[in-house]
Amino acid sequence: MSAHASPRRVVVYGLGGTIAMTSDNGRGVVPALSAAQLVEAVPGWADAGIEVEVVDFRRLPSASLGFDDLLALAAEIRGRLARGGVDGVVVTQGTDTLEEAAYLLDLFHTAAEPVVVTGAMRNPALAGADGPANLLAAVRTAAHPASRGRGVLVVLADQIHAAGRVRKTHTSGVCAFTSPDSGPLGLVAEGDPWFLSGPTVRFTLDPAAVRARPRVPLVTVALGDDGVLLHGLAGRADGLVVAGAGGGHVPRDLVAPLGELAGSMPVVLASRTGAGPVLRATYAYPGSERDLLERGLVGAGLLDPLKARVLLWALLACGGDRDAVVSAFGRAGGAVHG
């Protein structure tokens, strides 16, 4: 793959996070660097032949980002792409909620131009800080024609992941992001993205349909769970995601309350394991996946609990009913095709 003959243009939106943090008088690091400062710190722009436009959108640790922040960013990106003259978009943010943020952006991104989300595991004050390399790789990926039509991508440690499949699997390692079920879509080598598989099956929503801000809790099932976290959810939540054990299993004491909740709101059944789909018909005991699905819960397929919550939130925000939820999870939770 060769360098582009003419300059391409990428817009970089900064949200904060480790990649933009500096020391706070020795007490730790806090978001302080602007998006422009991040770009200025990256060597290699001259060789890239890419023009970079910078927008300082937020300066927050990613755990403090909310749905409204990301919906506003999605609208900003749509507007900028509609004005033309842009080949791709990069979003820099903290890695704590990067997998969720990237997936929410992907659900509302329908343009051909790619959006690439990146961050850093090592802050700029540490030896071997990975932010500059990740940012350069993300910009090169966003600018490349091969990235078009692939939706939102996540690029860290020279790996390219689909937003709907990537997970953060380590608290501090530089190779923290993996796609357990599918593997990465590709890699970045010698400054260019190399895609090893075709675009993933994507599910998108109309951003103009967002009307509400639903409340969707996530409850993770544990050994000896008595269901105390389920009490009082009826009438207070609009939907629920349950991270079951194994293939989607819960203790028998949770069966009745989950069945009751499924009668009043969409309840999605995911797996807490981190890889593999929610089963559909392997086990049949009380609290098994078959039992719960027959009681009205909706299987998440290959979507992990965090992404299942993001999708359910987005569907309810757009006014989707239970039938819409069942249909959407059947498509979004399906297998990856090359």
Image: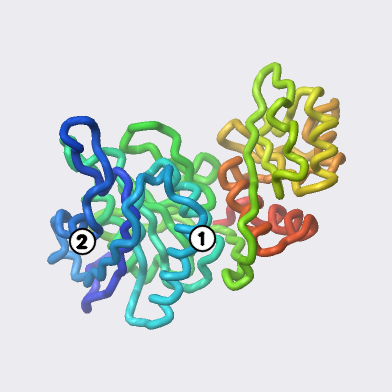
Q: Quadrant of the N terminus?
A: bottom left
Given residues 3 and 10, the one toward you in this image is 10
- Whether residue 248 sits left or right of residue 17 in the image: it is right
Given residues 85 and 320, the one toward you in this image is 320
When asked about the image quadrant of residue 306, the answer is top right
> Residue 106's mark?
1
> Where is mark 2, residue-wise?
36
Mark 1 burial class by Cα count in 10 Å: few <14, some 14-19, many 20+: many
Query: In percent of the image, x 84 and y 38: which residue is there?
Result: 260
Q: Position of residue 98 (x, y in %)?
A: 43, 47
Q: Nearer the viewer, mark 1 or mark 2?
A: 2
- Whether residue 52 sits left or right of residue 180 in the image: it is left
Number of numbered markers: 2
Colouring: rainbow
Q: Quadrant of the C terminus?
A: bottom right
Q: Is residue 198 visible?
A: no
Q: Identify the secondary structure beneath mark 1.
A: helix
Q: Position of residue 309 (x, y in %)?
A: 61, 46
294 versus 162 height, above or below: above
Look at label 2 and name its amino acid. Answer: Ala
Q: Is residue 158 visible?
A: yes
